[in-house]
Amino acid sequence: MSNKVKKNAVRAGAVIAATTAMLLMSSPAFALTRDDGDDPGPGLSVAETLGLYVAAPIILFLVIAGLVMAGDRKSRKQTD
């Protein structure tokens, strides 16, 4: 085994060890205790979730695409 391969193996091992240590230290059990000022509020309904994360991005995409197409038509008419 060459010296370069050994260094890369040691480096990869160190990265894996550090990542594992970080994951173990950030245990999800700490998320179960609420802070004094923590007030999560009511959750979203299915309709609100779909509207926010599905419908809104689609509508925004369509509006931007429409504006780009309208701007392209104007620039084509001016060059003709």
Image: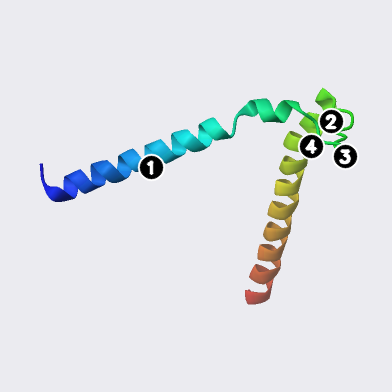
In the image, taking residue 23 as reference, residue 29 lies left or right, namely: right
N-term mark: 2 or 3:
3
Marks 3 and 1, how far apart at CA: 36 Å
**Residue 52 disc label:** 4
Q: CA distance from mark 2 to mark 4?
A: 6 Å
Describe the element under mark 4 as helix, strand or loop.
Answer: helix
As helix, strand or loop, the secondary structure at mark 3 comes to loop
Q: How many other residues sit within 10 Å of disc 2, few (<14), some (14-19) or many (≥20)?
A: few
Q: Residue tagged by mark 1? A: 15
Q: Image quarter for residue 72?
A: bottom right
Cα distance in 3D space between marks 4 and 3: 26 Å
Residue toward you, 43 or 70: 43
Quick one: label 4 or label 1, which is nearer the N terminus? 1
* Residue 49 occupies quadrant: top right
Mark 2 in CB contact with mark 4 (< 8 angstroms): yes
Q: Please say if the residues under marks 2 and 3 sit with CB atoms less than 8 Å apart.
A: no
Residue identifier under label 2: 48
Q: Which of these two is toward me, 59 or 34? A: 34
- Residue at the spot x=30%, y=46% of the render? 11
Q: Nearer the viewer, mark 2 or mark 3?
A: 3
Alpha carbon distance from label 2 to label 3: 26 Å
Three-letter code, disc 3 = Gly
Coordinates of residue 77 in the picture (x, y in percent): 68, 70
* Disc 1 element: helix
Query: Gap in Å between the C-alphas at discs 1 and 2?
Result: 41 Å
Q: Amino acid at mark 2?
A: Glu
Residue assigned mark 3: 37
In the depicted view, which residue is nearer to us: 7 or 40? 7
